[in-house]
Every structure is written in C-alpha cells, then in structure tokens.
Image (cartoon, rainbow, N blue to C red):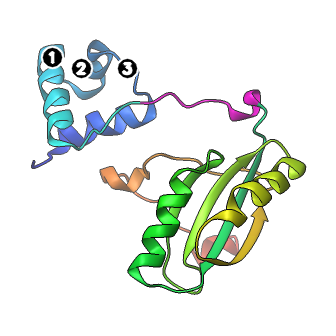
C-alpha cells in the first residue's frame, strides 16, 4: 500500500494516542470522519496497523526493574538459533528478544520486581535456555525515552545537536 501524507498523519496521531476517535482524527488531519474511517480500515487491512494496545504503568504491577540481558550461544547453527528462540518465547518474564549482530547473539529485555526477583528469573528461566554459553545483565537505572515509533518515521524533523557556534554562545 502506498502511504501519503494524510495516512502518515493518521498513523502519527494514532501512535501518540490509539484511542482517538475518528471525529478527533478528522479534526487533526482535515478529513471527514467517514474518510478517516475508510483510510484507517485500509491501513489495518494492509498490515501497516497490526493492532492496538494499552500502555500500562508496569511499576503499579510491581515490575519496577528493567534488565537488559546479553546472551551468547555455544554456536550459531540454525538448530542452535531455533532451539534458543523456541525456549525464550516460553519465558514469562521476557518482554522482548532481539537477534543481534556483533559479539552477543541475543539481547533480551526482562521485567522483574527487584534484583532478588531477577536472580530467580536468571536461575529458573534464562540459565535453562538451550544452547546458552554466556549471560551478561545490565540493570536500567531510569527510562529516558520510550516510543513505539520514532517521530522521524512520519517525516517529522529530527532535533539536531547544537552547532559549535551555538554551543559557544555566538
């Protein structure tokens, strides 16, 4: 599906607030609610919109500790990758997993209640995954940015670092 500026504006608004009504979207985008509904349905049917979800305050569920776990396997064969990936899907504390380039094979994002809870997760989930040779963990101290989609995806300009002259007060 070819996406135009109006589709990009709809997607940009929905990534900020997926609960916007078609009336609210029409006001922001400048189309009728009927046209918005038609375009939104087309975006869903094309797969550009795969679904909608609520963003939860995980600390209210007691999950205040985010851990980035770097995992190296004992080999990079197709069998090793498939075995690990099948295992990590079943880990209830893992919220994201990425196959990586570089020295680590995977980066896994884990949510835990605290350090003691992460120790349990490490012992009962991560260390039991197939083909794992090494696990290194880093604890996030504070979340700075959490976006589902970068603003640049919709053509919004990226902030530029200050020039040398601006930094020097010129």
**Mark identifier at residue 86:** none
Q: Earlier in the sequence, mark 2 or mark 1?
A: 2
Residue at coordinates 28% horizontally, 19% vertically from top-left?
27
124 to 25, vertically: above or below: below
Labelled pair 1, 3 in contact (Cβ < 8 Å) = no
Closest to the camera, between mark 1 and mark 3, is 3
Bounds of the magenta segment: 53-61
Q: Earlier in the sequence, mark 3 or mark 2?
A: 3
The residue singled out by tag 3 in the image is 20
Q: Is residue 156 left or right of residue 108?
A: left
Residue at coordinates 24% horizontally, 28% vertically from top-left?
29
Q: Is residue 16 left or right of residue 163?
A: left
Question: Where's residue 65, x and y in %?
Answer: 78, 47
The answer to if 60 sits in the magenta stretch is: yes
The residue singled out by tag 1 in the image is 32
The residue singled out by tag 2 in the image is 26
Q: CA distance from mark 3 to mark 2?
A: 10 Å
Q: CA distance from mark 2 to mark 1?
A: 5 Å
Q: Secondary structure at mark 2?
A: helix
């Amino acid at each position: 599906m070819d996406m135009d500026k109006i589709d990009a504006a709809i997607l940009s608004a929905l990534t900020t607030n997926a609960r916007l009504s078609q009336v609210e979207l029409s006001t922001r985008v400048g189309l009728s609610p009927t046209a918005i509904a038609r375009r939104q349905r087309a975006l869903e049917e094309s797969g550009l919109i795969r679904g909608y979800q609520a963003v939860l305050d995980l600390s209210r569920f007691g999950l205040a500790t985010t851990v980035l776990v770097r995992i190296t396997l004992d080999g990079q064969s197709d069998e090793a990758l498939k075995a690990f990936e099948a295992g990590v899907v079943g880990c209830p504390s893992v919220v994201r997993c990425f196959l990586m380039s570089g020295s680590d094979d995977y980066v896994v994002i884990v949510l835990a209640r605290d350090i003691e809870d992460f120790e349990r997760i490490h012992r009962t989930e991560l260390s039991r995954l197939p083909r794992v040779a090494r696990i290194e963990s880093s604890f996030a101290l504070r979340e700075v940015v959490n976006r589902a989609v970068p603003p640049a995806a919709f053509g919004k300009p990226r902030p530029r670092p200050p020039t040398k002259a601006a930094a020097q007060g010129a």
